[in-house]
Amino acid sequence: MKRKLATILAADVAGFSRLMAEDEEATAQTLGAYRETIAGLVAEHSGRIFGTAGDSVIAEFASPVQAVRTAVAIQRALHRHNADLSQQRRMQFRIGINLGDVMAEDDDLLGDGVNVAARLQEVAPPGGICISGAVNDQIVGKLNFPVFHLGERDLKNIPRPVQVYRVDWHPDDPSATGVLGGELALPNKPSIAVLPFVNMSGEAEQEYFADGITEDIITALSRYRWFFVIARNSSFAYKGRAANVKEIARSLGVRYVLEGSVRKAGQRVRVTGQLIDAETGAHIWAERYDRGCEDIFAIQDEITEKVVGAIEPEILMGEGLRMIQQAKADPDAFDCCLRGIWHHYQSTAEDYTEAEKWLRRAVEIDPKYARGCMALARVHFGRCIFGWSRDVTADCAEISRLAEQAVALDPRDPYCHYARFAGELMAGELHKALASAQRAIDLNPNFALAHLALGWVRVYLGHFDEALDPLLRAIRLSPNDPLIFIFMSYIALAHYHLGSHEEALHFAERALAVRRMLLDLVVAIASLGMLGRTEEAAPLISDLASVAPLDAEGYWRAVHPYTDPAHREQLFEGLRRAGMTFGDTAVGAA
């Protein structure tokens, strides 16, 4: 046998026997799903699972820092998944981590180093993480998770006492970050906003290309889960505005800002980028790239790695699964896709028609281009949400077809799973939609739309209290989002169903201040009805006709698919109390 020093992570389910006794099939299904999540996170942090007996998981890491990061990521992910299960069905893992000498026999590891990790797992509370003193010595000053000394412990069958520490893995409460008012607090991890790269081509027609480059860099950076990356929509709120980096960083609640420019001429492209520390104004990194257009993916990857390396080099060196490179699409399909996505973000009915034209062309040129399928599905979804669809049933079928195709082509793209969520939501398959939203967050915790999706589907499942956390996290990731009215609308709807009608009205009014849509008006009217303020509701009722969906029956069936009819009736009760009659309104077909 060979001997080596290794960091061992041991995890085990608390109360597994009780869970199995109550429902074997459901427990086995949950265990399988949670093991898949754990395996992905272990691989992402350069670890290796070498044991899965019963309900346990044992993994090896070369770095104690990576082992602790993995444990924190596991507990955060499983905590999010558990929120969708009843209290008695929630599956909580206890995790122990030790650094010690082990013996290697084939793929298995044996010895005291493994045994101590297993015993530390037994000391940890359900959903907790305990580490040995040896691990703590190696992570001091390298991680910002709070660690508490529990003292010296005698562990079963371990001949010497072991210093034990508990790691606090809980994320910030999103409502305490300033997301609902006041100055945004800096996250407890490196935070960055990527401003829209300036189009230096001298042609307004090339805006789509510069915007596409920027969005791809944002997506690549956001794949590093130990970074906090502001969503594309909030960064693009500063497009065309003079950049005062300190003010922008303060308004978005980040420390670093990346800005740059793009000049495209024929088949050549020049991209510049510079990374700025907003606290000091210092330029940390700057570079210029002159390449052929076929090298644009390589330029994006290099910029991403340079930025990560400048801010947190250990993450760049330690993570085994970094940004997943896009499949190299046909150049014409890529260009058509960028044009289509640009029109999609303009959020008008006319631009959606133009977006569909370009994206269909992209898919025709390259049928295996996952991004084109995904983006086209999102256009159909947006058309339904905004009420522009003349045939919601037909659009729903297209969303499902395109999303399934996108996921099959690129199962590790969180945007594809978001598109699948959209299709499943509209089809009324809410538990599938829930799983797709969770999967998108597992792949990219910085994906604001995935957090929105999770809160969205939880509302229609009747998990109103649990819906608020992901909706608030979506706002923190994209505080200046042009679609913030959708985020606010679902926060309002969750509060309405919780009986907090004043809160529901507050958020509905915040949504209406950005853009008047049917859901905003309906929640505001229903809240006023429940509060007995019918005079205030009257002018809002008169506004309904101006935002009525073209296919009202399909809209109410697909866009608002309550699993419990009583919850829909609860909403309509507020509308009746506000003085509405349903024969001649946008809500009448519901």
Image (cartoon, rainbow, N blue to C red):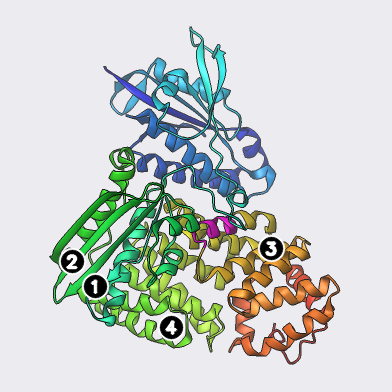
Nearer to the camera, 542 or 238: 238
Mark with earlier residue (4, 3): 4
User: Mark 3 Cα within 10 Å, few/some/many (few <14, many 20+)?
Assistant: many
Q: Nearer the viewer, mark 2 or mark 4?
A: 2
- Position of residue 35 relative to residue 405, above or below, is above
Dots 3 and 2: beta carbons under 8 Å?
no
**274 relative position to 571: left or right:** left
- Position of residue 486 relative to residue 24, above or below, is below
Give the magenta range: 470-479
Mark with earlier residue (3, 1): 1
**Mark-to-mark CA distance, 3 and 1:** 45 Å
Q: Nearer the viewer, mark 3 or mark 2?
A: 2
Q: Which residue position is annotated with label 4?
A: 352
Q: Quadrant of residue 109?
A: top left
Identify the amino acid type marked 1.
Met
Residue 369 visible in the snapshot? no
Dots 1 and 2: beta carbons under 8 Å?
yes
Residue positioned 64% across, 80% down in the render: 518
Identify the amino acid type marked 2.
Arg
Q: Which residue position is annotated with label 1?
A: 200
Residue positioned 50% across, 13% down in the render: 162
**Mark-to-mark CA distance, 2 and 4:** 30 Å
Residue positioned 32% across, 29% down in the render: 62
Which secondary structure is most common in the magenta stretch? Answer: helix
Secondary structure of residue under mark 2:
strand
Secondary structure of residue under mark 4:
helix
Q: Which residue position is annotated with label 3?
A: 494
Secondary structure of residue under mark 1:
loop
Mark with earlier residue (4, 1): 1
